[in-house]
Image (cartoon, rainbow, N blue to C red):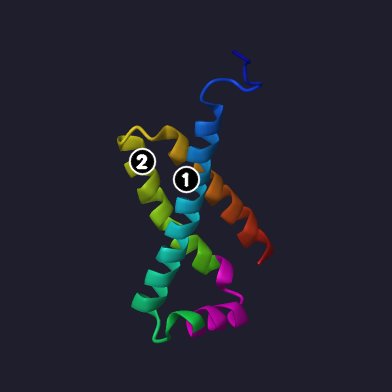
Amino acid sequence: MPRKNSTPGSGMNEIALLKGFILGIMASALGAFIFILLFSPYNFISGIQIMKSQGSLGKLITLGSILDLLLFAVLLKMNKDSIARGVVLAVIILTVLTLFI
């Protein structure tokens, strides 16, 4: 029986990391959506356009990332460490993104 060139379980870990990354991005987008709906008189699209014109889009992304903290805590409680690492990766990438916006 031929052996694979990868360690056992490595593919599953990468899939879990990708799931966590996607969940982290989606949680940040949901947080930004909720923030605009609750704290601005605009709808989501016009709220983003106004925040971008004011130079506050990075702050909006940062506020949206608060949900990532809750998601991270829930995933750790459920012993989903690989998915939680993906959420951390999403936060790191969003942090770097906000530096350039």
Residue 15 in percent (x, y) is at 51, 39
From the top left corner, tell me how far across and down residue 43 is, in percent: 42, 84
* Residue receiving disc 1: 20
Helix, strand or loop at label 2? It is helix
Residue type pointed to by label 2: Leu
Q: In the displayed structure, would residue 88 be above or below residue 47?
A: above
Is most of the magenta stretch helix, strand or loop?
Answer: helix
Disc 1 secondary structure class: helix
Q: Residue furthest right?
A: 100
Question: Which labelled disc corresponds to residue 49?
Answer: none
Looking at the rendering, the stretch of residues picked out in magenta corresponds to 46-58
Q: How far, Cα to Cα, is label 1 from label 2?
A: 9 Å
The residue identified by callout 2 is: 75
Q: Position of residue 84 (x, y in %)?
A: 44, 40
Sequence-first disc among 1 and 2: 1
Residue type (three-letter) at the residue carrying disc 1: Gly
Q: Quadrant of residue 54?
A: bottom right
Where is residue 94 shown, x and y percent of the image?
57, 56
